[in-house]
Amino acid sequence: TGVNIVSRNCILNGSTFEGRKKSSAFLIKTSYKPPIIISETKGIIFIPTHSERNKKCIWINLNGVLFYEAKSKNTIIIEFINHEKTIINVSYSIFDKQLLRATRLSLAIRG
């Protein structure tokens, strides 16, 4: 599952998923669906579209997002930097908030 891949990458970069989750929550003052730092040195941050316990959760690399827009009330289209597009079942406002949180986290780890 997606959380297993994210968790494995946290371990490969020197921490646990739970440790990264606590760090993100502390740095940006939010505990619900925090973005997860995969690598501070490479600036890799993943954004969850839903709670990590939800089977519908998809993890998006902040640095991979080029553009996103609403397709319908609860669906967005994301264009990635390689110009591939995907449709995700999440509202524009929720994804926009998640992207903002990840951007704040990115700025926080840069110091």
Image (cartoon, rainbow, N blue to C red):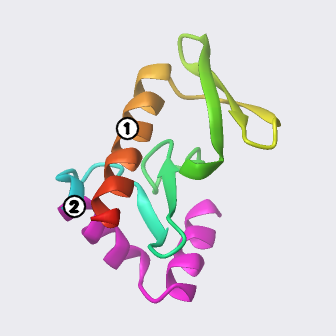
Q: Quadrant of residue 76?
A: top right
The span from disc 2 to disc 1 (Cα, nearest Å) is 13 Å
Disc 1 element: helix
Q: Is residue 72 above or below residue 15?
A: above
Q: Position of residue 2 (x, y in %)?
A: 62, 61
* Residue at 57 percent of width and 87 percent of height: 12
> Is 86 situated left or right of 91 in this image?
right
Mostly what secondary structure, the magenta segment?
helix
Looking at numbered disc 2 in the image, what kind of residue is underneath it? Answer: Leu
N-terminal-most mark, 2 or 1? 2
Q: Which residues are magenta?
A: 1-26
* Residue at 53 percent of width and 11 percent of height: 73
Looking at numbered disc 1 in the image, what kind of residue is underneath it? Answer: Leu
Q: Which residue is mark 1?
A: 100
* Residue at 46 percent of width and 56 percent of height: 52
* Residue at 33 percent of width and 65 percent of height: 109
Q: Position of residue 8 (x, y in %)?
A: 58, 80
Q: Position of residue 106 (x, y in %)?
A: 39, 56
How many C-alpha atoms fall within 10 Å of the one at disc 1: few (<14), some, or many (≥20)?
some
Q: Quadrant of residue 75?
A: top right
Q: Which residue is mark 2?
A: 27
